[in-house]
Amino acid sequence: MCFHRPSYLVTLIIIMPMGAMNLDDNIKLQILSFIMLIVLTVEFCIHYVTHGLHFNTVPLIGDDFTSVIGTVIFNLAFVVTIPSWVNEKKPKVSVNRSIWYSTIASVIGYIVVGLLGAWCYPQAPDNILRVLVSNESSTFTRICATLFAMGIIGLGIPGALSPLALFVRLRVVLVAMSHRSPPCVARFGSC
């Protein structure tokens, strides 16, 4: 197997053991990732506010919507995880309440972070992390942006969309539907 970048190998080494786990087996990693997401997002918002906001730079309605659909679909791609999550959740957990609250919180978070970033950096590139890791930002913000890129995006994208993660979800659903043991389904799923 050829790796074009060392980061692919590092991601594989980190993701592979998590892919072999059930969702409830890696709950500590999920909680750590969530805490990391909240802390880093708050740091970025503080950076935007202290760096200065220019409120007149963001129009109420833009004129180029070419990347909107892809961004929305990509950022709300959690729907592929719902079937396996429903099979793993505790019976007392409300599916509707969990999905609605988390989706509303995510949308509000995207709007707040997006507006603050746009007000702070009107001429920013498509990927605001490029600005946050540049010399224009403080050392602490550069470290946080690097951690965000590696820990949230780098591990989140392969974790959410990789064949390995989809195999984990498929295995969970097959176990729930067929009442077979996880090793039996794992052999079936890996054929």
Image (spheres, rainbow, N blue to C red):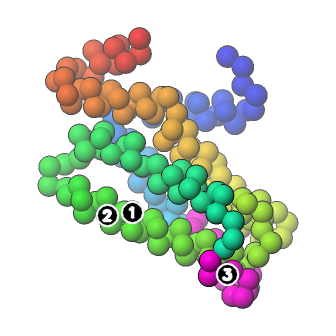
Kindly report the distance in space between the C-alpha atoms of the residues bearing marks 2 and 3. 28 Å
Q: Which residues are magenta?
A: 40-61
Picture quarter containing residue 176?
top left
Q: Which residue is mark 3?
A: 59
The vertical placement of 165 against 77, above or below, is above
> In the rendered image, which residue does mark 2 sit on?
100
Q: Check whether the beta carbons of the residues at disc 1 and disc 2 lie within 8 A of each other.
A: yes
Query: Of the residues shown, which amino acid type is indicated by label 3?
Result: Pro
Task: Determine the secondary structure under disc 2.
Answer: helix
Determine crowd level at label 3: few under 14, some 14-19, many 20+ residues with C-alpha closer than 10 A.
Answer: few
Q: Residue at x 25, y 63 (%)?
A: 97
Q: Residue 21's x, y, as percent? A: 38, 32
To which residue does mark 1 refer?
103
Is the residue 167 above or below the residue 76 in the image?
A: above
**Residue 60: which quarter of the image?**
bottom right
The location of residue 90, given as percent across then percent down, is 19, 48
Left or right of 117? Residue 84 is left
Mark 1 to mark 2 CA distance (whole Å): 5 Å
Residue at (77, 68) in percent of width and height:
124
Q: Residues within 10 Å of mark 1 (few under 14, many from 20)?
A: some
Near mark 2 (Cα within 10 A), the count class, few <14, some 14-19 or many ≥20, is few
